[in-house]
């Protein structure tokens, strides 16, 4: 609907009386529009001037004195990886729909808020989180906000829109097309002098890039040991855990990205490996926070009171049911509840606590890896991915393998790939200094993954080649349905993208990257039942690089 009347007139003077006319629009053709509060008109025009004509749309309900204002938030600044994991369409704006009193505007009731993407029909968890955040923001602002209060903030505003072009400076000052904000500053309250609609749009723009850094329930910043992860999640504060699991609060905002059955079983297998490890007190991190279904006021599994024996019992029940039952979700839950009341809550935690984006690759996978268990694995939060892309433009990048025993991946998927050298997490030696160890040669990283005769023994390349030729000719007789849960011999290896700056130390085919921001996981491969990967893969081979880029282009960079 068009706005009748013009509220920023180049002929306006600086006098107080004319400021009054500017704000309330009592002149000329505006007189016919008094049923719609003039301050609302002024704020709508401010959005159009600062953003664009298409950034706001209006729908009036005159008979009930209501108006819907749709504000269109551009999210094209999000990376493809982030938008895929968050299930948003980066090519389409997010719409904030605010319903105000048409005649009272800021003097009326607090507006209701809806957040949506018109083409995004399923699982718009980000919208739920953003709706809650903006609702809290509006409630705080509404305590002191009124049309008269806003008027005092805006009496000089009309001078900005004269033909001198100062609107460009104004836009620059607002940082409308802002990069990802510094963590911690995204909660700063934007200025009100440009109107409430611009203020809430700016606040939404500040919050969107860092949603993964804040708990979806309490909106407090996560305190992860190694920084935030890719997916929005619930924090470990007990009240939030209770709210999430017992009341379903914000359950749609932290929904499972890893919904595929094979991915779920892989997460369970990783959890089992960490829990059964002699190093579990070090590597089984995070420990589950699970509400007791018989007493919703207490935690059955509590990081402050670790009980590995009871946890093992519940995990055994999870695995036995998933091995036997291939039925519906409700059937599996029913069977688990009958066997152990903590089994299904534990499974929920295993899935929802995974903060990485891991999905099974389709048939267009990396054939040279010789395993059907291939996954896209993205675990970098937006801020780290942005820093990675900046460094990539400066120094370029390449691909290399990272091998780690399966018992470590439970933590890696939740805390990120970190520099474990000279810490209690270190398993192998750090002969080449402190950093994340990588290799362009598959056989070296396979050794670090435990692929060999002993769990922590690094086999030689000749041993791997011999086992590869022998094992991969044996017919696979076990049912595909059971996936990873019946195998006690799983090996995992990641294919990472690494920045080729001077910080990357190359000692032959063993590379050490001391800067964790310069390593991002891209793919993940699993070998089971003694299956062995090809030991002769070299990521620096042009044919291998071309194949990697083909699959990355299919999975990540195209929609």
Image (cartoon, rainbow, N blue to C red):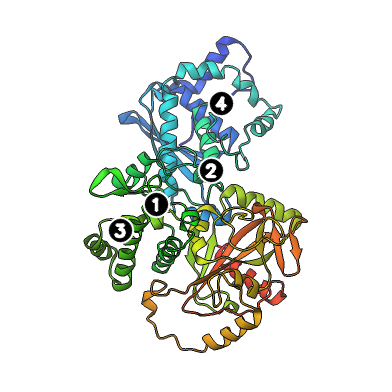
Kindly check if marks 3 and 2 are in contact, taking CB atoms under 8 A apart as contact.
no
Quadrant hosting residue 235 = top left
Task: Tell me: residue 497, above or below residue 3.
Answer: below
Element under disc 3: helix
- Please give left or right for residue 86 compared with residue 556 in the image: left
Task: Tell me: residue 541, above or below residue 33.
Answer: below
Quadrant hosting residue 349 = bottom left
* Sequence-first disc among 1 and 3: 1
CA separation, marks 4 and 3?
Answer: 47 Å
Of the numbered discs in the image, which one, if any, rests on residue 191? 4
* Percent of width and height locating residue 268: 40, 64
Q: Which residue is mark 1?
A: 288
* Percent of width and height locating residue 528: 47, 76
The N terminus lies in quadrant: top left
Kindly check if marks 2 and 4 are in contact, taking CB atoms under 8 A apart as contact.
no
* Percent of width and height locating residue 26: 49, 17
Of the numbered discs in the image, which one, if any, rests on residue 344? 3
Kindly check if marks 1 and 3 are in contact, taking CB atoms under 8 A apart as contact.
no
Residue under the point 34% across and 45% down = 244
Of the numbered discs in the image, which one, if any, rests on residue 210? 2
Element under disc 2: helix
* Sequence-first disc among 3 and 2: 2
* Sequence-first disc among 1 and 2: 2
Kindly check if marks 1 and 2 are in contact, taking CB atoms under 8 A apart as contact.
no
Residue under the point 69% across and 30% down = 169
Residue toward you, 347 or 456: 456
Examine the rendering and report whether any part of residue 154 can be seen.
yes
Q: Nearer the viewer, mark 2 or mark 4?
A: 2
Q: Nearer the viewer, mark 4 or mark 3?
A: 3
CA separation, marks 1 and 4?
Answer: 41 Å
CA separation, marks 2 and 4?
Answer: 20 Å
Residue toward you, 534 or 167: 534
């Amino acid at each position: 609907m068009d706005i009748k009347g013009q509220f920023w007139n180049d002929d306006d003077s600086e006098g107080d009386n004319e400021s009054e006319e500017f704000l309330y629009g009592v002149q000329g053709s505006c007189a016919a529009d008094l049923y719609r509060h003039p301050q609302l008109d002024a704020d709508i025009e401010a959005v159009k001037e600062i953003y664009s004509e298409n950034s706001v749309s209006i729908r009036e309900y005159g008979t009930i004195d209501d108006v819907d204002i749709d504000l269109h938030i551009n999210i094209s600044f999000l990376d493809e990886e982030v938008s895929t994991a968050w299930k948003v369409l980066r090519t389409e704006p997010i719409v904030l729909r605010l319903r105000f009193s048409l005649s009272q505007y800021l003097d009326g009731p607090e507006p209701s808020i809806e957040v949506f993407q018109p083409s995004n029909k399923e699982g718009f968890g980000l919208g739920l989180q953003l709706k809650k955040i903006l609702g809290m923001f509006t409630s705080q602002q509404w305590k002191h906000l009124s049309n008269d209060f806003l008027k005092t903030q805006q009496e000089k505003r009309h001078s900005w829109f004269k033909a001198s072009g100062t609107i460009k400076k104004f836009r620059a000052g607002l940082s409308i097309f802002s990069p990802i904000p510094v963590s911690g500053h995204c909660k700063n309250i934007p200025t009100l002098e440009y109107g409430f609609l611009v203020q809430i749009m700016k606040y939404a723009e500040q919050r969107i890039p860092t949603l993964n850094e804040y708990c979806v329930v309490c909106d407090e910043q996560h305190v992860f040991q190694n920084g935030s992860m890719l997916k929005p999640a619930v924090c470990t504060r007990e009240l939030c855990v209770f709210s999430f699991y017992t009341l379903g609060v914000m359950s749609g905002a932290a929904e499972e990205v890893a919904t595929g059955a094979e991915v779920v079983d892989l997460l369970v297998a990783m959890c089992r490996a960490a829990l059964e490890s002699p190093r579990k007190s070090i590597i089984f991190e995070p420990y589950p926070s699970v509400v007791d279904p018989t007493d919703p006021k207490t935690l059955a599994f509590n990081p402050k009171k670790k009980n590995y024996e009871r946890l093992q019992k519940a995990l055994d029940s999870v695995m036995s049911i998933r091995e036997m039952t291939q039925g519906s979700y409700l059937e599996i839950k029913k069977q688990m509840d009958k066997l152990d009341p903590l089994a299904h809550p534990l499974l929920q935690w295993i899935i929802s606590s995974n903060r990485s984006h891991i999905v099974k690759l389709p048939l267009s996978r990396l054939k040279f890896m010789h395993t059907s268990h291939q996954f896209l694995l993205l675990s970098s939060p937006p801020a780290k991915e942005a820093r990675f892309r900046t460094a990539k433009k400066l120094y370029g990048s390449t691909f290399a393998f990272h091998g780690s025993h399966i018992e470590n991946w439970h933590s890696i998927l939740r805390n990120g790939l970190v520099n474990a050298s000279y810490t209690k997490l270190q398993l192998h030696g750090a002969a080449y200094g402190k950093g994340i160890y990588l290799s362009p040669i598959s056989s070296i990283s396979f050794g670090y993954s435990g692929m060999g005769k002993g769990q922590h023994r690094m086999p030689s390349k000749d041993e791997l080649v011999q086992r590869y030729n022998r094992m991969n000719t044996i017919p696979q007789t076990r049912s595909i349905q059971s996936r990873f849960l019946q195998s006690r011999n799983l090996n995992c290896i990641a294919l990472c993208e690494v920045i080729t700056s001077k910080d990357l130390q190359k000692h032959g085919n063993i590379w050490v990257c001391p800067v964790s921001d310069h390593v991002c996981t891209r793919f993940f491969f699993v070998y089971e039942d003694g299956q062995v990967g090809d030991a002769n893969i070299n990521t620096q081979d042009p044919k291998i690089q071309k194949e990697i880029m083909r699959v990355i282009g299919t999975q990540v960079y195209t929609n």
